[in-house]
Amino acid sequence: MKLRAFAYLGLFLLGFGLFFAQGQSSPSIESKYVKSIAKLKKSKEVKRAFQEILALEDKTLERHIALTEIPAPPFKEQKRAVAMQEYFTSLGADFVWIDEVGNVLALVEGSKGNLNIAVDAHLDTVFPEGTDVRVRIQNDTLYAPGIADDTRGLSMLLTLLETLRTTGIQPEHNLLLIASVGEEGLGDLRGVKHLFRKDGPKIDKWISVDGGSLARVNNQGLGSYRYRVHFDGPGGHSWGAFGLANPHHALGGMISKFVQYADAYTKSGPKTSYNIGTIRGGTSVNSIPFESVMEVDIRSIEPSRLDDMEELLKQAANEALIYQNSIKRRGPDLSLRIDKIGNRPSGKLSESLPLIQSALAASQSFGAEPQLTIGSTNSNIPISKNIPAVTIGIGGRGGKAHSLDEWWTNDNGHLSIQMLLLLTLSQTGIN
């Protein structure tokens, strides 16, 4: 089914640090892509569009700030989604809709429409409900939770759309602008997973905008498994019920064993990481807890190693359970439950793919030294399905992502918008 039918149905690598890219390599760029990008960049349509992007600098920043100040906690992106829907509509997209999971989609119909090219930035932030997201401006720097990741990407999409409409550029192929949900944390890429479901809209190529500089060309998806581990027991008074099996003691034993096993495993082979990010449970210092819960993140560039680490996690948990139950002096056994709460697939696309080569050439055309990177972004899903996909940077300068002191400075930030337009038009063509 064509995208139009769906619409009628209601459908700092570099500037941002290692958070945005966990590895990098220097690529080779074929001369034909360098020449093609240079030719497109010199065209009268693109030159006019570049001037329009510069003229829209104040609007871009204004929308950037306005969107940042609309809270978008995990699983609660609705208010920001509505704002993006209104922006897309007012800026002249042909069709705009919010899908079943909350993604906002805006279709710019191509003159031929043989392919569907998607450009994405994510709506959600890592910050919980109630976080103060007001933007503070000191000199030329913006401070606010989520100011860079990924609200800048959202404002770039809006400027891209306005530039196309203001200059009258019509792509040959369909352009689908997407403000997606569920990129961060336990969102587990649910927005993009929904888009790439079996009966989802046909997407031929995918471009994500998420963190990093002009040099970022992310062609590898860093896979991850995430777990919530529960130890449960009867609980009781620390003195009166002493001798009951203690969930916290079991959890502590599991952590010790898992770290021992995981450390030995990850010392060799393809890079693999592990992290126990949260621990909770218990009611007071003089109460035996009735539950102990932790959340674990495991990542690897090699999918099979995630499965190996899962087995080590389960082994450590079961050994800790058996030991704690063996030393209890009274009462029932502890129980154990391990829930898999996240599964981000990994994958790698060849740097020889036209989309990747075009992104490298576009980055280089702005004077950057492009780097191929590996990271965990919305592109993980299309990459794992071998669909051409890339994640590029938001530009400018920034830091302290995922912290309350996150910041971003508009240091030639327009160049990344110009690169996004250039890359997009290299894939959609110009009528």
Image (tube, rainbow, N blue to C red):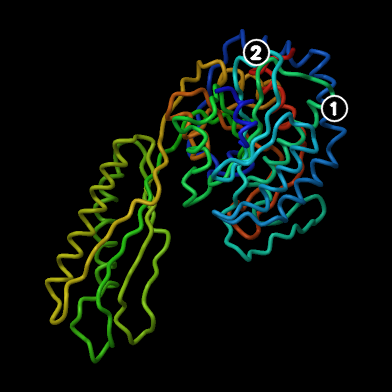
Residue 69: horizontal and vertical position, in percent?
72, 56
Above or below, 341 relative to 213: below
Badge 1 amino acid? Thr
Q: Residues within 10 Å of mark 1 (few under 14, many from 20)?
A: few
Sequence-wise first label, 1 or 2 = 2
- Which residue does the image show at 75% across and 52% down from the upper left? 142
Above or below, 192 relative to 424: below
Distance, label 1 to label 2, CA atoms, is 28 Å
Badge 2 amino acid? Val
Q: Quadrant of the N terminus?
A: top right
Residue 361: horizontal and vertical position, in percent?
63, 19
Label 2: which residue?
A: 34
| Residue 283 shown left or right of residue 200 in the figure | left
- Which residue does the image show at 73% across and 41% down from the upper left? 155
Residue 76: horizontal and vertical position, in percent?
58, 55
Which quadrant of the view contains residue 354? top right
Which quadrant of the view contains residue 322? bottom left
Observer-side mark, 1 or 2, equals 1
SS for tag 2?
Answer: helix
Residue positioned most to the right: 55
Residue positioned most to the bottom: 240
Label 1: which residue?
A: 166
